[in-house]
Image (cartoon, grey):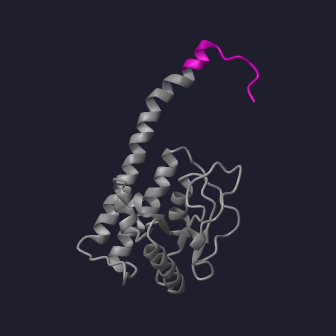
């Protein structure tokens, strides 16, 4: 709580480093996303990914896709999340194959990628975002087309299948289907989306 007025000199000390550091942090954050996209592109290069019989990445492909976690942590760092304190011990995938969380901002997804190596259920439109779409493909994100009933049925079956198979990474779901302001809770969408 700052009660005294800042001098012009002190105000300038805040403004000028910000003008220099903000573009650098934005550039480095985008670089982290680009590296994540590169690693997931390599992980899926030459691989035919089918919605019907998707299998978890194995061997070097899983190692390459696993680099998304450190890239997500780097992005969080450049966004200003320098220290992230975790209370308690996260449950292993064998005990919690599905993580359901409130979605206040996009940052939760990056933190889950880093801490639990999670993949996600996401709306299909997100796969069209440059770089993020490549990362989603490499992380084997389950995409749902909200306007298509067949898509919703597929996603429910795929969530169930992946939750039962220990070879898949933890699955993250944000059942409100969008980000919110955390002052209230939206209705959960049926089928967790």
Q: Which residues are magenta?
A: 1-12
**Residue 97 screen position, x and y as percent:** 57, 78
Quarter of the image with the N terminus in it: top right
- In which quarter of the view is residue 52 placed? bottom left
**Residue 50 screen position, x and y as percent:** 32, 78
Q: Residue furthest left?
A: 46
**Residue 187 screen position, x and y as percent:** 66, 61
**Residue 57 screen position, x and y as percent:** 37, 78
Report the residue at 53% width, 86% height from top: 164
Report the residue at 70% width, 67% height from top: 88
Verify whether residue 5 appears in magenta: yes
Q: In the depicted view, which residue is nearer to us: 111 or 104?
A: 104
- In which quarter of the view is residue 23 placed? top left
Q: Is residue 152 above or below residue 188?
A: below
Verify whether residue 59 appears in magenta: no
Q: In the depicted view, which residue is nearer to us: 164 or 30?
A: 164
Report the residue at 67% width, 51% height from top: 182
Total marks shown come to 0
Q: Is residue 187 above or below residue 49?
A: above
Q: Is residue 80 above or below residue 23?
A: below
Q: In the depicted view, which residue is nearer to us: 94 or 146?
A: 146
């Amino acid at each position: 709580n700052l009660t005294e007025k800042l001098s012009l000199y002190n105000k300038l000390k805040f403004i000028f480093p910000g003008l220099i550091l903000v573009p650098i942090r934005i550039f480095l954050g985008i670089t982290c996303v680009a590296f994540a996209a590169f690693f997931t592109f390599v992980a899926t290069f030459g691989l035919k990914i089918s919605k019907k019989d998707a299998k978890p990445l194995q061997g070097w492909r899983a190692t390459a896709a696993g680099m998304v976690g450190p890239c997500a942590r780097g992005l969080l760092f450049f966004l200003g999340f320098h220290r992230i304190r975790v209370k308690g011990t996260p449950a292993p995938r064998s005990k919690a194959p599905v993580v359901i969380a409130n979605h206040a901002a996009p940052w939760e997804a990056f933190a889950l990628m880093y801490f639990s190596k999670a993949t996600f259920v996401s709306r299909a439109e997100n796969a069209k975002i440059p770089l993020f779409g490549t990362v989603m493909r490499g992380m084997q994100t389950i995409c749902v087309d909200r306007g298509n009933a067949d898509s919703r049925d597929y996603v429910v079956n795929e969530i169930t299948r992946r939750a039962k198979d220990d070879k898949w990474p933890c699955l993250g779901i944000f059942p409100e289907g969008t980000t919110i302001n955390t002052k209230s809770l939206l209705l959960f969408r049926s089928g967790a989306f």
